[in-house]
Image (spheres, helix red, strand yellow):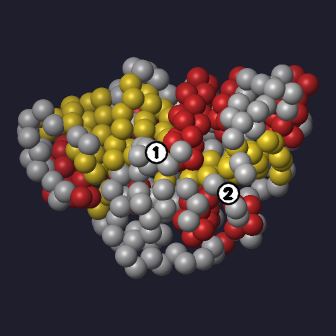
Amino acid sequence: MSARVVLVGLGGIGHPCALALAQCADISLVFLDDDRVERSNLHRLPAFAEQHIGRYKAEALCEVLAPSAKAGLSVATERLTPETAAAAIAGASVVVEGSDNFATKFLVADACALAAVPSVHGAAIAWTGTALSVRPKQSACYRCLFEDLPEGESLDCSSAGIFAPVTALVGALMAQATRDLLAHKPSLAGTITRFDARDGSFRRHVVRRRHDCALCGDMPSILSIDRARYLAPTCAMGASP
Amino acid sequence: MAISVRIPASLRTLTQGKEEVAAEGATVRAALDQLDKTHPGIKERLVDDKGVKRFMNIYLGDEDIRFLDALDTPLKDGDSLTIVPAIAGG
């Protein structure tokens, strides 16, 4: 039976991650994204071209990859919500989160921790990208690193833009992290990898588990998915750094 | 104590695009106070009255200052602080 990998978000970082994982014969991939391809996305979605504009990213990517993919492919063109999260990740071996908004990032982090499913989180903004993998109960979780959603003032890709090659590199990092989690390697789980395209540097920081973490600490307060925890603006796409 | 501070892309509008800036201080708090004088507004992006903001991380070398003495973490010449904010682009 193949490992089930759920990809949440098929934008600039989820897309290249999917391209890499689709060549793995020992997994089945589930593409989960309700977004559609826009012209402004094309520079960081290398498998797409003009004819894909307006189509669901998940469906179009599945169609493009199907002829050559070694992995099994399936599609869900729906948005991950607090109401659907538990079902969406049920049975997953790893969830790969490459969404463009904090609400989804924290929702995936929480749902995965509660279901004891390993996860990989990626993000990119301007010249910088990050990747973090999480092995529940063994490594630090996303909330050990970032306790809660930013309060309105953080920059996102709509204000800072994205240098497209950074997203491809983060996608590759996430694919490798997924392979490591599936192989139960003593991987970089709990380590955040940061790439800065301005000087080509990689930096890694070990994220320690926080005893007071609301999600995985000694006395966790997040015991279920509550919609009120995930209220944040989404990230408009298309800006340049 | 003369130190360097690596600035994330999301905060470089406050440092005239510089990815690394110099600061001085005997503690992280003092260094941020001094940094705020040369780059006004940066401190409030990093800390609030409870300490380092919950979606920010400040590393001294490879260690999160929350696991040291937080803002009272002492610094020595040549130390390097790295600011790691939550980001959500993709």
- Residue at 23% across, 40% down: B61
Please name the residue that numbered disc 1 is placed on.
Answer: A185
Left or right: A241 as drawn, with respect to A233 = left
> How far apart are the alpha carbons under marks 2 and 1?
18 Å
- Name the chain under label 1: A
Residue A72 position (above or below residue A228): above
Bin the neighbour count of mark 2 within 10 Å (Cα to Cα): few under 14, some 14-19, many 20 and up.
many
Name the amino acid type tagged 1. Answer: Lys
* Quadrant location, the C terminus of chain A: top right
Which numbered disc, 2 or 1, marks the residue closer to the eye?
A: 1
Q: Considering only vertical position in the picture, is A31 above or below A83?
A: above
Q: Tag 1 or tag 2, which sits nearer the N-term?
A: 2
- Residue occupying image coordinates x 53% and y 45%: A183
Which quarter of the picture shows residue B77?
top left
Q: Position of residue A130 (x, y in %)?
A: 48, 39
Q: Which residue is mark 2?
A: A92
Q: Nearer the viewer, residue A21 or A211?
A: A21
Residue drawn at (70%, 68%), measured in percent from left and top? A86
Q: How many marks?
A: 2
Tag 2 subunit: A
Picture disc at residue B82: none
Location of residue B29 in the rendering, given as x and y in whole percent from the top left corner: 19, 52
Which amino acid lies under the numbered mark 2 shown in the image of this protein? Ala
User: Going 74% across and 45% down the picture, which residue do you hit?
Assistant: A29
Looking at the picture, does residue A187 appear above or below residue A148?
A: above
